[in-house]
Amino acid sequence: MLLNEKDFKNEGVKIAALIMAESARTAPKSKGEDTIEIVYVDGEEMEKIAAKMEEMAEGGDKDFIRDAESVRKSQAILLIGAKGDRTVGVNCQACGFESCSEFKKADRKGENFVGPNCAFRMIDLGIALGSAVKVSAMLGIDTRIMYRIGIAAKKLGMIDADVVMGVPLSALGKSPYFDRAPKK
């Protein structure tokens, strides 16, 4: 049997994304409580994200267009988010409230992400993201953590989380996520 890499590239990227997802899932969490949400996206759903990002650029942030182009050059996206409303219960005040019970009474809202959020849950999100992209680096898959992808996917209802980041994946000759010119 002969297989050209071009014929299985997307399958390899999907396998990498699935392993990245498991690394994010098993990353350490505050108090051992998991509030992380993970969704794999490819195909037509990626185009929906890119189109939503272009629509959002009309609000003034032209980098949504640049990042939409990166989405279109990707083979897959991993959405990783966290539910920030679940406190750890240590009354650390990092959220800006006197106690976790005061935090729980807060009016949670937001146009792109929902907040306020428990700082420990956001730390958990960062650790999960770091764990995922560590795996991609080990596997030789290009990625970049992009909040604009997360916003678009959240607005499209693709993931149930308060704060979401998108991690596009690519296996091209050159990473499409760096050396990108800002849109004017």
Image (cartoon, rainbow, N blue to C red):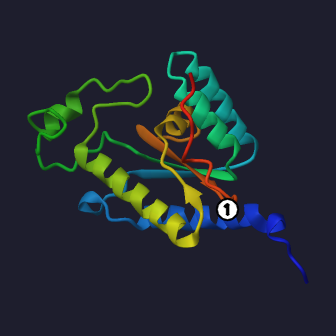
Q: Residue at x 11, y 44 (%)?
A: 91
Q: Is residue 29 visible?
A: yes
Considering every residue shown, the one lying at the far right of the view is 1
Point 62% across, 48% down: residue:
176
Residue at 81% in and 64% down: 6
Element class at badge 1: helix
Name which quarter of the figure residue 14 lies in: bottom right
Q: Position of residue 113 (x, y in %)?
A: 41, 31
| Res. 156 in view | no
When the figure is inspected, residue 88 is found, relative to residue 52, above or below; the finding is below
Measuring from the top left, give residue 124's x and y in whole percent.
32, 54
What is the x, y in percent for residue 93? 12, 39
Q: Is residue 176 above or below residue 153?
A: below
Name the residue furthest top: 59
User: Which amino acid type is shown beneath numbered disc 1?
Assistant: Lys
Answer with the quarter of the image where residue 5 lies: bottom right
Q: Nearer the viewer, residue 9 or 48?
A: 9
Per the image, the residue denoted by label 1 is: 14
What's the residue at 66%, 37% (across, down)?
Answer: 69
Determine whether, in the image, residue 89 is placed left or right of residue 16: left
Left or right? Give the position of 178 relative to 100. Answer: right
Furthest residue toward left:
98
Quadrant containing the C terminus in the rendered view: top right
Q: How many marks?
A: 1
Quadrant occupied by the N terminus: bottom right
**How dense is the environment of label 1, judged by Cα within 10 Å: few (below 14), some, or many (20 and up)?**
many
Q: Is residue 141 left or right of residue 173?
A: left
